[in-house]
Amino acid sequence: MKNVLLFLSLILAQQMFAQSSDFILLKKNKKTIATYFPGTNIGFFTNTGTFLQANITRIKNDTLYLKEYIVRQVSTQLGVYIIDTVSSYLYQYHYNQIKSIGKTGRRFDVNGSGAILMGGGALLLVGSAVVLLADNKNFSPQLMGAAAVLAGVGYLLTRVNNKGIIIGKKYTLVYVQAVAAK
């Protein structure tokens, strides 16, 4: 019986093979820093400016097949809120349509903080200008200078490019075909 099982397993092993998948490499100055293959999540901006955070379902012939899940907080019949998948969308993108890849993990929102600083500085500037016009003896030039500095720093922070790793001279995407086409 053992010989029959061994014989059958050898015959079946010759007929079966594992289909390896194609994958995408993110390289920085010819050094691989990330690998994207089916089953991994990817977040990127396309050439048209669309941001997509999705799961790679397949990579074939230079094309990424993606599935995006829309997850929202929804109410149940009991009035309790749960997090649930509302819908999902399928996408196909050629790997050359990726303009930049988002950085993973939790990041500090530089643009949002800059907007708050700029708004607060502008509000203090307007308030100082009103005090200057209405009541000159209570005017504080130090406060007006600090408000101008806050607004300027806020403006500079909003101008910082926070769109992730931009594909170009330093970073490149390389498509690797695992199995040659027949």
Image: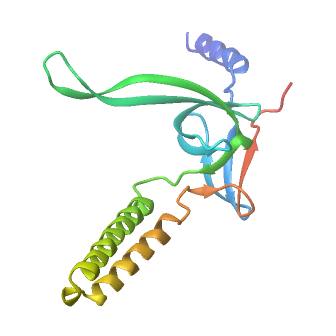
Name, please, the residue furthest toward the front.
134
The image shows residue 41, relative to residue 117, as above or below, that is above
Q: Position of residue 83 (x, y in %)?
A: 28, 30
Residue toward you, 8 or 77:
77
The residue lying at 61 percent from left, 14 percent from top is 3
Q: Position of residue 104 (x, y in %)?
A: 48, 52
The image shows residue 130, relative to residue 116, as above or below, that is below
Q: Quadrant of residue 36?
A: top right
Q: Is residue 101 left or right of residue 25?
A: left
The residue lying at 27 percent from left, 73 percent from top is 127
Task: Tell me the colour scheme of the image.
Answer: rainbow
Residue toward you, 61 or 178:
61
Q: Quadrant of residue 169?
A: bottom right
Name, please, the residue furthest toward the right.
182
Residue toward you, 110 or 154:
154
Q: Position of residue 57 (x, y in %)?
A: 58, 29
The image shows residue 129, relative to residue 163, as above or below, that is below
The image shows residue 161, relative to residue 93, as above or below, that is below
Q: Position of residue 129 (x, y in %)?
A: 31, 77
The residue lying at 78 percent from left, 33 percent from top is 179
Which quadrant would the C terminus be assigned to in this image?
A: top right
Which quadrant would the N terminus be assigned to in this image?
A: top right
Residue toward you, 30 or 64:
64
The residue lying at 35 percent from left, 63 percent from top is 116
Count of marks placed on residues: 0
Q: Is residue 74 left or right of residue 91?
A: left
Q: Quadrant of residue 73?
A: top left
